[in-house]
Image (cartoon, rainbow, N blue to C red):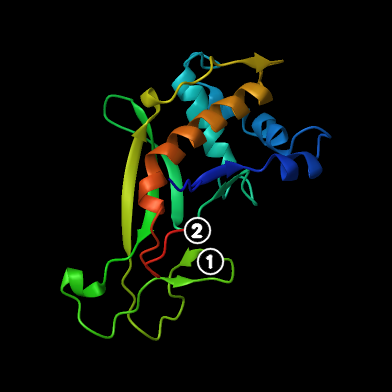
Amino acid sequence: MIFVRAFEPDETYDRTYASNGESRYGAYLAQYAHLFTDGHGLTEDAQHFAAAAWQITQEPTMTPAYVHTHGRVQAATVNWDDEERPAICVDLAVSSPPEAACLRHPWRRWTRDEHGSWTLPGDYRHRNAVTLLRLAVPLAEVPLPYAAYQDDQPHTDTAKQAVRAICTTLNAALVHVLAFDPLTGDTP
């Protein structure tokens, strides 16, 4: 079985470019500590803690992002349902011809950049039509650590542990979807 990682934290970049000398992500955690409050102070809820930790790892908060993504991943955001249950919602570029939506020629599709990432056709002289697949993975499925703080700041190692647990769960959920490249028909 081929394993394709959709999400991978970049620990090397995190340490190398750390403004606080330890962790670039840790510095962002301190800067965005307000995301870890729940109306009663610092949250003790593991899912709320993990959701805030995940949100910080993504662009535009961290540029470049702490967590690298597969080229088909367009976004990975935390969304909450009406019952206040969080999920990581992953938007994937999928190859569906514009004709599937009854759109006829000359609609343009996904393109690839120099790194192989799927990108929107940037030329607006022509019509563009792309398809996204949104997958929602509940945080209740993720084995999360307990919320932890140090000096009223999110504990960096605990936040990283939560992020790694989310990455592991998302990678397992997406492995079969990403094992086939619909633009080329190849498996990685």
> Residue drawn 40% across and 62% down?
181
Q: Quadrant of residue 32?
A: top right
171 with respect to 113 (left or right): left
In front: 68, or 55? 68
Looking at numbered disc 2 in the image, what kind of residue is underneath it? Gly
In what element is the residue under mark 2? Answer: loop
What whole-number distance in Å separates the C-alpha atoms at marks 2 and 1?
A: 6 Å
Please rate how many residues cluster around mark 1, counting C-alpha atoms within 10 Å: few if below 14, some from 14 to 19, many from 20.
few
Q: Which mark is residue 116?
A: 1
Does residue 105 appear anywhere in the picture? Answer: yes
In front: 147, or 162? 162
In this view, the residue farthest toward the left is 102
- Up-down relation of residue 114 to residue 132 (above or below): below
In front: 33, or 165? 165
Q: Which mark is residue 29?
A: none
> Residue drawn 32% across and 49% down?
134
In this view, the residue farthest toward the front is 1
What residue would you read off at disc 2? 71
> Residue drawn 20% across and 76% down?
103
Location of the N terminus by quadrant is top left
Question: Do the numbered discs 2 and 1 sit on residues whose CB atoms are within 8 Å?
Answer: yes
